[in-house]
Amino acid sequence: LAKTTQPISMDSYEGQEVNITCSHNNIATNDYITWYQQFPSQGPRFIIQGYKTKVTNEVASLFIPADRKSSTLSLPRVSLSDTAVYYCLLSGSARQLTFGSGTQLTVLP
Amino acid sequence: GAVVSQHPSWVICKSGTSVKIECRSLDFQATTMFWYRQFPKQSLMLMATSNEGSKATYEQGVEKDKFLINHASLTLSTLTVTSAHPEDSSFYICSARDERGAGTEAFFGQGTRLTVV
């Protein structure tokens, strides 16, 4: 199963932009890169998904370089409510979803 | 976005009893659903893949006779924890894959907190 690697934790301050990078060196051709957010005692919530280059939605941007061996989730102007665990996953049509350790983002006032 | 509903949100049961957890995809059909278990301060661990109309595929180390999975329709999968013991206390989460999009996005239920006393 494909493995993703993320920093265990990150701290930021309110109003700052946060970038979380994920490494996925053995990504397959049919894999999409998907990011989820999880609050304590809740199921993960879909944030954004992309295949290559850049994807942007109302909450985040996802940057994927040409070799697709890494990706960066960008959260603009974080608030205290963005404190959560963020997971990067690879999801292809024939691939089970395997969670890595995730990144605990703590937003400080 | 797509919605996955999980029920119940929490349950307390006595040792030796069985508990059923339901996972429904509310606005899309899902031929594949996934069941995860999450212990405090840890990541989600995949337990099994539920396939509509066929047997579930269990991950190594997960007892299929203890964690019964039924995926009888395209919108419902159930996980039954049989003869529950305190060590089965955990947060159980299901997900369903929305295959209408090119990215085969997966959406998650709100989770079920199981406490076995």
Image: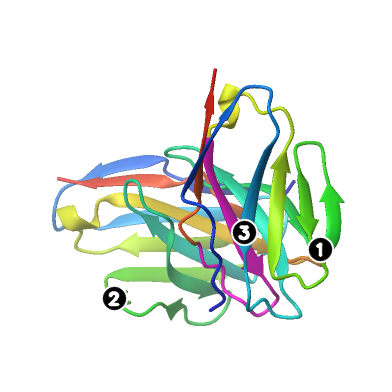
Separation of disc 1 and disc 2 at Cα? Answer: 33 Å
Residue B98 shows up from this direction: no
Q: What amino acid is labelled 2 in the image?
A: Glu
Q: What amino acid is labelled 1 in the image?
A: Gly
Q: In this view, does B95 lie above or below A69?
A: above
Report the residue at 58% width, 26% height from top: A81
Q: Is residue A29 above or below residue B71?
A: below
Residue interval drawn in magenta: A84-99
Q: Mark 1, mark 3: which one is toward the viewer?
A: 3
Q: Toward the viewer: B54 or A91?
A: A91
Q: Where is residue B84 in the image (x, y as percent from the top left)?
A: 20, 58
The residue marked by circle 2 belongs to what chain?
B
Q: Where is residue B107 in the image (x, y as percent from the top left)?
A: 63, 54
- Regarding mark 3 in the picture, which secondary structure is present there? strand
Residue B48 has which mark?
none
Report the residue at 61% width, 50% height from top: A36
| Residue topped by disc 2 | B63
The residue marked by circle 3 belongs to what chain?
A
Q: Toward the viewer: B1 or A46?
A: A46
Residue A22 has which mark?
3
Q: Position of residue B4 (x, y in %)?
A: 60, 50
Separation of disc 1 and disc 3 at Cα? Answer: 23 Å
- Local crowd size for mark 3, using a 10 Å CA cut-off: few (<14), some (14–19), many (≥20): many
| Residue topped by disc 1 | B101
Report the residue at 68% width, 22% height from top: A15
Q: Toward the viewer: A105 or B16?
A: A105
Report the residue at 42% width, 39% height from top: A41
